[in-house]
Amino acid sequence: MDKNINQEIGELTQKSPLLSGGTGGRLVFCTNNAHKLSEIQAILGDKIEVLSLKDIGCDVDIPETGNTLEENALQKARYVWEHYHLPCFADDTGLEVEALNGAPGVFSARYAAVRYAAAQKAAVQKAAVHSVATESQHTEPSTPPASHDSEANMTQLLNDLGENNNRKARFRTVIALIQKKDVCPCGCTSIKQEHLFEGIVDGEITRERSGAEGFGYDPIFRPNGYEKTFAELGVDIKNKISHRARATQKLCEFLRGEG
């Protein structure tokens, strides 16, 4: 990334209408994912305090039922805004693999579970047509993978790709920000504003796992221009070049009035 995000937001608290009000430089990040929270806080630096759902007393598992990353990010942010009336942002990230027609995409976090469910449904339908037992017709595990199981997701993805030489892929993050905008100078009237920011990093899927840092698909994703996976590069480099970093930079620029 050309710009250093931590340096760029040095005067963000003073310049941003969103952060100069009662929130005191705080934004709610609509997640309790510890990896995401630490990553986003490192990217934003110490000029903005990032609050988790737990910090505001929200223990609801906010549903993500959208068909796109944009829909899911907005769904989470709208829930927090409508129930807590706090400026907030939510993100959704997908790994899009060219040879798999953009899969796992919006299902990235639960890819193995989704594929398992699809295989089970197909087996039941086949059994109904041919009136045969389903146990011998598929090789899926007897116990369904848990949602958000990174190891199962990576295994499923590598199996689906097989020996395909087209390993092109990209990570895409969408951030949805919801804030209040005063439409009267005295602040007596305000409206809700929604904004979307996208970050993309291109790369390829490796044939085996490498590296121990990061989370999700990091051990099998190698960004263009690097010889190592995200998990091998480490958080310092990843936080400068990642999809989430690029989306967050756009968020920062908007808050400063540059977007």
Image (tube, grey):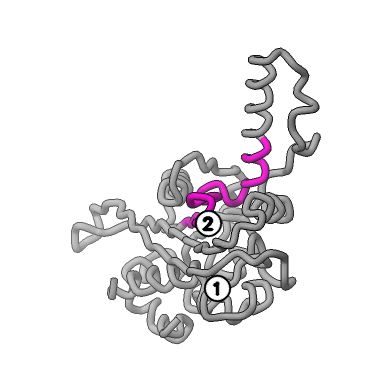
Dot 1: few (<14), some (14–19), or many (≥20) neighbours within 10 Å? many
On the picture, is 119 further left or further right than 166? right
Residue 91, given in percent of the width and then of the height, sits at: 48, 57
Q: Front-most of 34 and 1? A: 1
In the figure, 25 relative to 31: above or below? below
- The label on residue 97 is 2
For image coordinates 73% across by 42% down, the residue present is 145
Dot 2: few (<14), some (14–19), or many (≥20) neighbours within 10 Å? many
Q: Front-most of 159 and 189? A: 159
Can residue 81 be seen by looking at this rendering? no
For image coordinates 52% across by 62% down, the residue present is 169
Residue kind at label 2, given as amino acid type:
Val
Corner quadrant of residue 19: bottom left
Residue 101, given in percent of the width and then of the height, sits at: 48, 50
On the picture, is 174 further left or further right than 181? right
In the figure, 204 relative to 31: above or below? below
Quadrant of the image for the N terminus?
bottom left
Q: Tell me the magenta residue range.
A: 90-116
Residue 171 counted in the magenta span: no
Residue 214, given in percent of the width and then of the height, sits at: 66, 69
- According to the image, label 1 marks what residue? 223
Residue 102 counted in the magenta span: yes
Look at the numbered disc 1 and give the secondary structure of its residue: strand
For image coordinates 62% across by 40% down, the residue present is 114
Mark 1–mark 2 CB contact (< 8 Å): no
Count of numbered circles on the image: 2
For image coordinates 45% across by 69% down, the residue present is 248
